[in-house]
Amino acid sequence: MVDKKIIKRWKKYHEISGVGPITRRYFVMNAFDGALTMLGVVIGAYIAGILEPLPIISAAIAGSIAMGTSGMSGAYMTEKAERTKKIKDLEKAMLTDLKNGIHHKSHRYATVLASVIDGLSPAMAAIVVVSPFFFVNLGLLTAYDAFFICIGLTLSILVLLGAYLAKISDESMIKYGLQMLLVGGVTAFLCVVSSILVGGNVPY
């Protein structure tokens, strides 16, 4: 278990750094990207007639690792640069060295937290979307069933993200949910059309 003093310290860092809104944006944007990206992979595989679970699972894992690593490293470098500038500006204004002070530690905490959320959110969303194919590999589902369950999981993730955004903005959950579903539907349609245009055939 994490020590209560550490949790209290992290809460203090969280408040001082103002990282809350940033991590919320990273979480929603990247979970959204991860879910739709993996939906595109599944639809492309289905249209191409690749119904064996292992190639899809391998592509999903590789894609999740790539998205996670890219997101984490990109967010870390970006946040580090931005927050280093803030610390330097604050030091100039206060005419003092803030290294190892609470502001410096708070910004370092924010950099790490933002990068972890940026990396994990798309990877986790992607794995959730493709998870039915793990059951196909175990012989518990057919590839045909898994394909439609993947679509259902993607739409569910989008609705949940829409509800989360609605809660943050104090807006209608139905409105945000429908907007997210619309984006998901358009994405699925474009994936199907593009896959067919490059020579795929819809298997029945």
Image: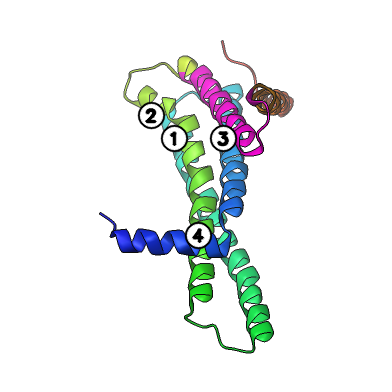
Dot in front, 2 or 4:
4
Residue for badge 2: 134
Residue contact between numbered discs 2 and 1, judged by CB atoms under 8 Å: yes
Q: In which quadrant will I find the N terminus?
A: bottom left
Q: Amino acid at mark 3?
A: Ala
How many labels sit on residues?
4
Residue 83 visible: yes
The magenta region covers 146-173
Give the camera-side residue of 31 and 129: 31
Q: Amino acid at mark 2?
A: Phe
Nearer-N-terminus badge (1/4):
4
Residue for badge 4: 14
Task: Quadrant for residue 151, please give it.
Answer: top right
Residue at 63% across, 83% down: 91
Q: Distance between the Cα atoms at labels 3 and 2? A: 16 Å
- Magenta run includes residue 155: yes
Residue at 65% across, 34% down: 170
Secondary-structure class at tag 3: helix
Residue for badge 3: 35
Dot in front, 3 or 2:
3
Nearer-N-terminus badge (2/4):
4
Nearer-N-terminus badge (3/2):
3
Residue for badge 1: 57
Q: Distance between the Cα atoms at labels 2 and 4? A: 37 Å
Nearer-N-terminus badge (3/4):
4
